Image (cartoon, grey):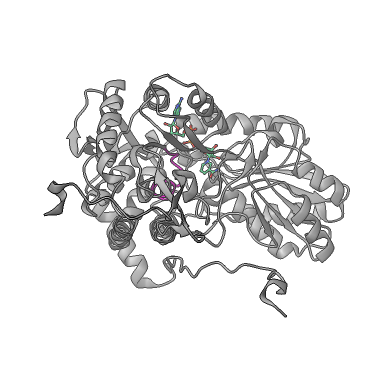
Amino acid sequence: MSDSKQPTPAVRKAEPFRNEPHTDFSRKENREAFQTALDDIAAQLGGEFPLVIGGKSINTRKTLASINPSRKSQTVGVVASATSDHAEEAIAAANRAWESWRYVEAAIRAEHLEVMAAEIRNRRFELAAWEVYECGKPWAEADGDIAEAIDFCMYYAQQMRELGVPVQCDYPGEENSYSYRSRGVCVVIAPWNFPLAILTGMTVAALVSGNTVIMKPAEQSSVIAAKLMEIARDAGIPPGVLNYLPGVGEEIGPVLVESPDVNMIAFTGSRAVGLAINKQAAETDPRQRGVKRVIAEMGGKNAIIIDEDADLDEAVQAVVGSAFGYSGQKCSACSRAIVLEACYDAFLTRVKAATESLKVGPAEHPATTVGPVIDQEAFDRIRDFIAIGKDECTTVVATDVSELAEEGFFIGPHVFADVDPDSRLAQQEVFGPVLAVIKAEDLDQALELANGTEFALTGGMFSRSPRNLQRAREEFEVGNLYLNRNITGALVQRHPFGGYKFSGIGSKAGGHDYLLQFLIPINISENTLRRGFAPPPDDEKA
Ligand code: NAD
């Protein structure tokens, strides 16, 4: 058989990549080392963190206080708050720096990311400890976030080394070369819920592709972002190539997004802000270099379907873990369980018992599985949803944590059953420890309910029927579908992450085509049948 008749292979293999292992906290030495890191960071709380623009540290008159959600009276750090003038300064610095950074070889830029990864690895427990205090992340969650940040650096470095090599497609008399250029200045606007990983992922993707970056972290996680700035500086990222611009999103966000000197926005956060950014960025100003590129990774209303033959032992554990891990504040969190009638009552009985066994407490405490929610605004919003649940649905679990409420923003896990699929509780993103359980007559209805929101981020199904699992593969409208497992904890390369519909514009973070969004493809064709070359001018001959 000639080569052209070879059958197309059924799968393409991903290139080898090794994810950073998570820390095993069942080992005493790891627990002790982590506790030491927590004690060390406790002694550093309350420090000041200036802006960094063009390599210079700048103090501002207005500041933001970053608070420990487990202990509202404790200030984790006092962070500078940028004004629109600072935003303009940062844009100018990033544009100046782009003039040289864009010409740095891809392999050298990749090396910078590898050095950053090594530095994050060296400071792993210290960084995770900052997250415990600043974002109320329980130990294992904080550790996972740091591991993911390392993965983003290593994976995008690997990807850029490949993309940095031009693809040749030559014909007799004609040379064709396909390669990439950077876009320019990229504004990175990040959420607080994966405080290091998401910020690092968007930032290093932009940097390694030759763009310069203005990093605007979420107000609630600006201290950990200052640590990333430190790491980038220590890794030799030149002044102005990365700028640290904490501030109030509603104030400086629009200044950054609308500037004619910004070329790209990489955003992760809520649907409302993502759509507003997309709209603002679409407006063109005669001074700008071209149409702005927007990546916006937004919210979800993720469901797990429990089929009638599902293994309930596994399903219940996965639903509870996915719904209440980090207090339901993961974009991938399960907020709806859609359960087939045949196993509905049995599922509810077991979910109730499993949820009631969760340990709610301060994130610093090693036994805590459910910590606080991020801030007062989240606390009030989630409480409003709980009031709706109590009013409109059957309350299955309403964990009372009033004894902790004085100290921090604690809300215990809640489970509501018989939820109307069209109600606010079933349609809007709660982003807290609240699970809505919905009954479905059959799989047709379950899939219809699962797809019946404006989001398409993550979803899952527990079933023992290969036919039904196949239907989920084909019909479940989500960017990340998980079968017979939990729906959180996406790993770089293994589970490239991101949604569609109103959950996202862009390709998947940690996936093989992510970097392409930060690059401009260029094809150069040269007729090589020309007669010789003109000699170089005299001044170049020497
Ligand atoms: P948010 O939208 O409130 O804030 C995100 C960022 O946008 C912050 O840095 C904030 O300061 C900034 N911002 C606020 N207003 C702005 C404006 N007008 N212009 C520009 N920037 C502005 O979101 P959050 O509360 O930080 O994060 C939670 C949300 O993020 C949830 O909806 C969650 O689902 C989503 N999320 C999605 C993913 C994903 O990959 N799809 C990942 C993590 C979080």
Q: Identify the residue shown where x is 30% and y is 53%.
A: 533
Q: Identify the residue shown where x is 74% and y is 49%.
A: 476
Camera-nearest residue between 214 and 35:
214
Q: Which corner quadrant holds the N terminus?
A: bottom right
Is residue 356 in sight in this rendering?
A: no
In which quadrant of the rendered view does residue 49 lie? Answer: top left
Q: Identify the residue shown where x is 77% and y is 36%.
A: 421
Expressed as whole percent of the image width and height from the top left, the position of residue 295 reads 51, 39
Expressed as whole percent of the image width and height from the top left, the position of residue 411 reads 53, 40
Is residue 239 in sight in this rendering?
A: yes
Expressed as whole percent of the image width and height from the top left, the position of residue 227 reads 28, 47
Expressed as whole percent of the image width and height from the top left, the position of residue 310 reads 78, 62
Quick check: 122 above or below 361? below
Q: Identify the residue shown where x is 73% and y is 56%.
A: 461
Camera-nearest residue between 127 and 530:
530
Residue 46 is inside the magenta segment:
no
Quick check: 140 above or below 84? below
Q: Which residues are magenta?
A: 189-201
Q: Total number of numbered labels? A: 0
In which quadrant of the rendered view does residue 202 lie? Answer: top left
Q: Is residue 219 left or right of residue 193?
A: left
Furthest-front residue in view? 531
Furthest-bottom residue in view? 1
Furthest-top residue in view? 286
Q: Is residue 494 left or right of residue 150?
A: right
Q: Which corner quadrant holds the C terminus?
A: bottom left
